[in-house]
Image: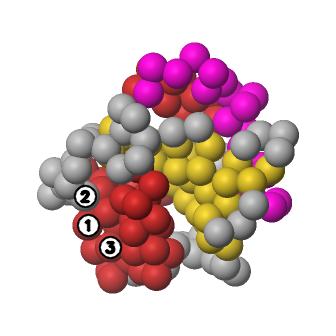
Amino acid sequence: MVPSSSAMQVELLERTDAYVVATWRRIMLLVWSGQATVAGVERSRALFRQWAERQPGGAAFLVVVPRQSTGPPDEATRAAMQRAASAPGGYLKGIATLIEAEGFIAASVRALMMRLQARGTQGPPPNIFRTPAEVAAWAAALLQDREVTPEQLAEAIHVAREG
C-alpha cells in the first residue's frame, strides 16, 4: 500500500506502468495511463471488493480513460470488464467511466463503453461521462456526499495520476 496524499486524502493502492488504483472518499479510482488490460481490470476488481466491503453505505467505482488515444479493449479485457461490472455485493453502489478525450473518437469510445457495460451485466447500470463535473454530480447524489465536488474530484484524479 502506498501512502496517501495529505492534502486530498487520496490513498494509492497500486501503481503500474499501465494504471493506478486509488481511493478518495467512497470512490475507487482506476486511472489508466494507456491501454486497458485484463490484469488491471482484475486487480482493481479485487482491490475494490476488499476496500468497498469496509465502506459504510457502499462505494462507487470510477474508471478514468486518458486523453491520449487508446484503442478499444481486446476480447479478454472486455470479458474482464463485464465480470467486474456484474460483481455481486451490496457494497457496489455504482460504476462510472470518465472518458477525458473529446471529439468524434471520444464519442465513439463512450458509445462502445455503454454497449460493453450494458451487455449482460447484473450490477448497477453503466454511467459514461465526459467531465469530472458530470461524474461529481452523479457520485455526490449516489453516495449522498455533498463534499464530492467537480474541483475536488478533478484534484483526486490528478493526485492519483501524478502520485
Which residue corresponds to mark 2? 87
Task: Kindly identify which numbered label has been placed on residue 83.
Answer: 1
The stretch of residues the image draws in magenta is 143-163
Residue 41 in the image, given as x and y percentages of width and height: 44, 71
Considering only order in the chain, which callout, 3 or 2, is on the residue closer to the N terminus? 3
Q: Residue 71: percent from the left, percent from the top?
A: 54, 73
Q: Percent x, y for residue 163? A: 80, 61
Q: Is the magenta stretch mostly helix, strand or loop?
A: helix
Q: What's under tag 1, amino acid-wise?
A: Arg
Mark 3 nearby-residue class (10 Å; few <14, some 14–19, many ≥20) = some
Q: Mark 3 — residue?
A: 80
Say what secondary structure mark 3 lies in.
helix
* Dot 1 and dot 3 residues touching (CB under 8 Å): yes
Q: Does the magenta portion include 148?
A: yes
**Mark 2 Cα-neighbour bin, 10 Å: few <14, some 14–19, many ≥20:** some
Residue placed most toward the observer, 99 or 86: 86
58 in the magenta segment:
no
Q: Which one is in front, 16 or 90?
A: 90
CA distance separating discs 1 and 2: 6 Å
Residue at (46, 65) in percent of width and height: 47
Observer able to see residue 20: no
Which residue corresponds to the image point at 82% horizontal and 60% vertical from the top-left? 162
Label 1 neighbour load within 10 Å: few <14, some 14-19, many 20+: some
Contact (CB < 8 A) between labels 1 and 2?
Answer: yes
User: Is 89 on the left-hand or right-hand side of 47?
Assistant: left
Q: In this view, does 6 lie above or below 33?
A: above
**The disc labelled 3 sits on which kind of residue?**
Ala
